[in-house]
Image (cartoon, rainbow, N blue to C red):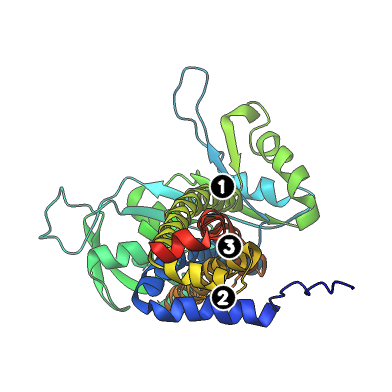
Amino acid sequence: MSTRRTPASRLLGRDVVRLGMAGLRARPARAILSALGIAIGIAAMIAVVGISSSSQARLNDELARLGTNLLTATAGKDLLGKDTKLPEDAVAKVGMVDGVESASSTAALPEPVYRSPLSDPDATGGITATAADTALLDVVSGTLRAGNWLNEATSTYPAVVLGQTAAERLGVASPGTQVWLGGRFFTVVGILDPVTLAPELDSTALLGEDVAKELFGFDGSPTTVYERSADEAVGSVRELLGPTISPESPEQVEVSRPSDALAARNAANDAFTGLLVGLGSVALLVGGIGVANTMIIAVLERRREVGLRRALGGTRKHILLQFLAEALLLSALGGVVGCGIGAAVTGALAFGNDWPFTMPAVAPAAGLAATLLIGAVAGFYPAVRAARTPPTAALNS
């Protein structure tokens, strides 16, 4: 007499998913709250990465538009620590350096700037009067918000162009307004937009060199020299600026590259982004603990269900897969919602700040992978505990 073996019970993949979803639908409120913990962590990580990437894209676009080939030269200090001066012909010398395409300069003047002669003498608002070369605007890639830039005519008359910050602090909204500069009225002929590569110009009142010499005794010595060079020549020009401007004391000339400051600022933002991603990871871990707690409670509450399934032929593997599927589905739900929230927050901030929306494809993929991993880890112990529960003990609980 032959003995026929009973085929092993099998649980299809679609049945595992269906059982997992049924378990979540049975307790919707608890499932939503647990998934929300995962979603908050993922949303924080996605939003931080997306905002950082969008900010980086905006900076790259801005640098591409403004260029990274602007160098500035300023007077340093001598061996005794005293301030030095650049020579009057500094701009002309710089213009003769091979690779230099254009050059200009500014010179700070010791003249206060006020809204009117009745203003408080101590309320300068940090605004400085500055003599500017007519080529300055093109060299620093500046733009006008209103009015006109200094030209050969207005440079000889009491006319000024205000930086954005200076205009705001003086309460000047449009050209044609007069301000009190150096003990006399000057007419505002233009207002600048923020100058990204030369932010020091934002809080200045710029007047022509000719009128500065006539009214304030300007000696022609610039405070800062700005120059544009060919991209491939920036390195060599940077080395030659000091010796060219001051052959006797090249070490007293300080040369900088404004775009390097922007890059440094972006590097600082990246470090801050890393910190926020770390905080998001902690929130994600807390969400994982919430999933584990939910699954453990589900096992305790469903011992009778586990016992009944085991009595009807369900194997330990079936029980293990069922509860593990619930944990994975719970985490996946939180991950998808979190990615959506993070992308929405990034899009809103990018739109509000006029940034290009940028989201690295690896960010949501890594976020979802992290949620599934956390779900698997969080649900493994409760699933094993449910699988090991004896049918009789479960039915008698």
Please tell me whether residue 346 is drawn above or below residue 83 in the rendered image: below
Q: Is residue 315 left or right of residue 88?
A: right
Residue type marked 1: Ala
Q: Is residue 183 left or right of residue 276?
A: left
Image quadrant where one finds the C terminus:
bottom left
Lower position in the chain sequence, tag 1 or tag 3: 3
Query: Looking at the rendered structure, which numbered label has been put on residue 314?
Result: none
- Element at badge 1? helix
Q: Residue furthest right?
A: 1
Residue 126 placement (x, y as % from top left): 28, 51
User: Distance of mark 2 from mark 1, alpha carbons?
Assistant: 21 Å
Count of numbered labels shown in the rendering: 3
Residue at label 2?
Answer: 356
Camera-side residue: 222 or 373? Answer: 373
User: Distance of mark 2 from mark 3, alpha carbons?
Assistant: 9 Å
Whether pointer 1 and pointer 3 mark residues with C-beta atoms closer than 8 Å, the reply is: no
Residue at label 3?
Answer: 56
Residue at label 1?
Answer: 264
Give the quadrant of residue 245: top right
Camera-side residue: 345 or 356? Answer: 345
Q: Residue furthest front?
A: 1
Dot 3 crowding, Cα within 10 Å, few <14, some 14–19, many 20+ = many
Q: Is residue 326 in view from this perspective?
A: yes
